[in-house]
Image (tube, helix red, strand yellow):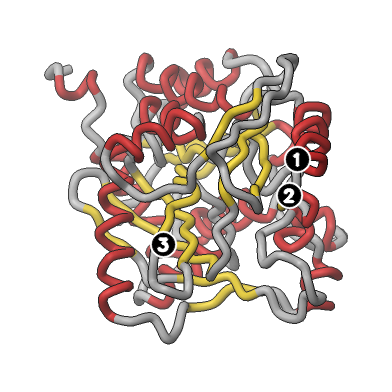
Amino acid sequence: MKKLKILVVAHESLVPPDSLEGYGQRQIDEWRTEYDVVSHLKTAGHDVRCIGLLDSLTELRTTIQEWRPNVVFNLLEEFDGIAKYDQHVVAFLELLRQPYTGCNPRGLTLSRDKVLSKQLLAYHRIPTPQFALFRRGKRVQLPSKLRYPLFVKSATDDASLAIAQASVCTDPQSLKERIAFVHEQTQSDALVEEYIEGREIYVGVLGNDRLTTLPVWEMHFGSLPEGQAAIATRKAKWDRRYIAHHGIGTAAADNLPDAVMAQLGRLTKRIYRALHLTGYARMDFRLRNDGTIFVLEANANPNLSEFEDLAKSAKAAGLSYDDLLARILSLGMSYQAAWRSNGA
C-alpha cells in the first residue's frame, strides 16, 4: 500500500502516548486499541495524526480542511458521552466528502439500536432470542410469552456494561430488580431476552460488497464456579485478575461440525447485509448443544486491539495485524458513499 496521510479519530481521553514506557497496565488497557492502531500505522510508514473528540467537531473539520488526509481512521465509540452518536460523526465525514474506515452511518444506526436490529433480523428470518423492551421511566409489566431464564442488558450500551451473573434471571422478582438496576446504572432502556445456554461464538467479517468471514472464534469460560452462567460479563471481559483466576479466554473454535461452520458463515453474511454494514464487524452467536444457532448481536467497528478477538482471528486466517489495518484502510477508501455515487 502506498504511504497515506491518515487522521486517526478517537475519544478525547483515549489519544495514546508515543510510548508505553512509564504507564501501568490499567492505564494501557484504556487506550490499547488506539495505541496499537497509531503505532502500527506509523511503523508502516504512513503520515499519522491523532485527534481526540469530546463534544465538538470544530477541530475535526479544521484538520480535514487544512491537512487534507487521504482517509480518517475512525476509532470513536461515542460522541458527547452518547454511544449512538458516533454515527453522526461518520455522517459528518460524509458531508465533508472525506473517506473513512469502518461502518457507514446507516449501518451504525441499525446495529447500535439493539431492538431495531433484532426486529430486522426477525424479518429476515435470522434466528435471534425472543425479547421484550422495558423503557426507562415506564411501569414494568412482565410479558407472559418469554420463558425463564431471561437475560437482561442495556438496549444501547456495549462492552458488557452492566452485565454480570445477576443479569441471568430465573424468576419475576429477580427480573424486576435487574431491569431497575439497568435503568439506574446505564440510564437506558433494558432489553430482556431469553437466555440461550450454549457456546459463545464470534465471527469476524471484512468487506463492503464482497465479504470475507474470518475463522470462527469462541469464548471459553474456564473454571467458573458451579451454578454460574457462562456469559461474557464485564468482569469476564475486562478484569485481568478475574480472567486469570478462572482461566477465561478466547481461541479458535474447535470440534464444530462442517455444517455448523458453514451455517455460521452464511448467517454472518446475511446479518451483515441485512443491517447494511460496511468495513468490518463481528457477529456474536450462541450455539446450543443440539446445533441450533442464535445471533445475539452484530458489532460494527469492534475492538481493534492487536490482541483482541478480531485481530487474532484475522491472524489465524493469515492476515497479520498490519495486513488487517491495511485491509480496513483499503475498504474505507473504496467504500462507495453517496457523494461518490453521485459522481462527485
Q: Secondary structure at mark 3?
A: strand
Q: Is residue 17 among the parts visible in the rendering?
A: no
Q: From this viewpoint, is residue 316 visible?
A: yes
Q: For the residue labelled by badge 2, is the local secondary structure a helix, a strand or a loop?
A: strand
Closer to the camera in the image, 117 or 51: 117
Q: Which residue is mark 3?
A: 203
Give the residue type at disc 2. Answer: Cys
Q: Which residue is mark 1?
A: 172
Residue occupying the point 50% across, 29% down: 113
Q: Nearer the viewer, mark 3 or mark 1?
A: 1
Q: Is residue 61 left or right of residue 249?
A: left
Packing grade of label 2 (10 A; few <14, some 14-19, many >=20) is many
CA separation, marks 2 and 3? Answer: 27 Å
Number of numbered discs: 3
**Circle 3 Cα neighbour tier, 10 Å, few/some/many (<14 / 14–19 / ≥20):** many
Q: Position of residue 239 (x, y in %)?
A: 81, 62
**First in residue order: circle 2 vs circle 3:** 2
Q: Which of the 4 quarters of the picture holds residue 80?
A: top right
The answer to whether the residues at label 2 and label 3 have Cβ atoms under 8 Å apart is no
Q: Is residue 161 left or right of residue 303?
A: right
Residue at x 32%, y 47% (from the top left corner)? 126
Apparent side of residue 56 relative to residue 71 in the rendered image (left or right) = right
Q: Is label 1 or label 2 in front?
A: 1
Q: Is residue 39 above or below residue 12?
A: below
Give the structural element (helix, strand or loop) at label 1: helix
Label 3 sits on what residue type? Val
Left-right relation of 221 to 115 = right
Q: Give the amino acid at mark 1.
A: Pro
Q: Earlier in the sequence, mark 3 or mark 1?
A: 1
**Residue at the image point whose x is 35% and y is 45% from the top:** 279
